[in-house]
Amino acid sequence: MPIYKKNYLLVSKIYPHLMRKINYKYWSDYLVMLSENYVTNKSNVLELGAGNCLLAFYLKDNFKNIIATDLSFSMLNSSKDKKVKKVCSNMTSLPFKYSFDLVISCFDSINYLIKKNDLLKLFTSIHNLLSDTGIFTFDVSLENNSKIHIKVPIREGKFKEITYKHLSSYDEINRIHKNTFEIKLKNKNVYKEVHKQKIYPFFDYFRLLQKCGLYVLECFDAFTFNDATENSNRVQFIVKKIK
C-alpha cells in the first residue's frame, strides 16, 4: 500500500466527511467573541492551517481583510469560496511583510509541529508579524484529548465513492498522537496517509511563548470562557507581545 508523505493530499478529498459534525458558524462566533475587545472589522487577519477555508468563510463576515494560509495546496484548492484570499505557506516561515492585528490557528494545527524548534520558529514569526496591540489565538490538543480519541481507535466511512478507514493511536512515552488513514479511491487503488501530532505538556506553551517575546493573556477550555488547566482536553490561548 503506497504511503503518501504529503499530509492531506488524499485526506482533502474526504475532509468534509471527517468534519461533518463540526459547526463552523459556532466556532467562528466563538473566535469573534474572543477577539472583539482587541480588533475591529477593518483589522488585518491571518488564519494559519486554514484547511478548506470553511472557518474563514464565516470569519470573513466579521473580518473583511482576512487571509487564509495552509501548508497543503490540496486543502486550499478544495475550497469553493473564491472571495477568501489564500496563500499556500508553512506556518513556521510565513512570507508576509506587513503586520496583522489578529492571527488565528485552529483545528489543533499547531500540534502538527513535532519539534520544539519548529514551535519556536512559529512563535518567533508571530512575534514579528503581530501588531503591537494585536493578539494571536490558537487551540491545542492536550493528552486527555488523545486518551479520549483512542477509546474508539478505528472509524470507517464513505464519501463520494471513496471509502476510508481512520486508525487513531497515542504513544504516551513520546507523546505522539498518530492518525492513519487508509483510503480506497473509486478506481479501487488504496493509499495510506499517516498524520503525526505532538502532544506537548500544557506549561510548555507558556515557556516557549515567553522565549519568543510573547505572553499568555488568557487560556480557556476550548469553546468556553473557563480557565484551562493541564487536565483540559483542548485549550484556547490568547497571546500578546511583551512590551
Image (spheres, grey):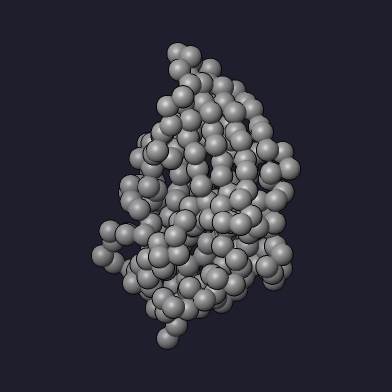
- Asked if one can make out residue 110 in the rendered structure from this viewpoint, the answer is yes
Q: Is residue 239 left or right of residue 124?
A: right
- Of all residues, the one furthest to the top in this rendering is 187
Q: Nearer the viewer, residue 232 or 239?
A: 232
In the rendered image, the residue lying farthest to the bottom is 243
Residue lying at the far left of the rendered structure: 97
Point out residue 162 in the picture as x, y percentages from the top left corner: 53, 21
Q: Nearer the viewer, residue 142 or 158?
A: 142
Where residue 128 sits, quadrant-wise, is bottom left
The residue positioned 54% from the left and 70% from the top of the image is 205
Number of marks in the image?
Answer: 0
- Above or below for 43 versus 29: below
The answer to whether any part of residue 133 appears in the image is no
Residue 102: name its quadrant.
Answer: bottom left
Location of residue 117 in the rendering, given as x and y in whole percent from the top left corner: 40, 65
Residue at the image position 62 percent from the left and 48 percent from the top: 170
207 left or right, relative to 77: right
Residue 24, image x, y percentages = 58, 46
Please tell me which residue is depicted at 69% across the width and 69% down the height of the picture.
229
Q: Nearer the viewer, residue 226 or 185?
A: 185
x, y percentage for residue 217? 56, 77
Q: Residue at x 26, y 65 (%)?
A: 97
- Judged left or right of residue 109, residue 232 is right
Pick the front one: 90 or 119: 119
Question: Quick one: quadrant of the C terminus?
Answer: bottom left
Is 81 located above or below residue 202 in the figure?
Answer: above
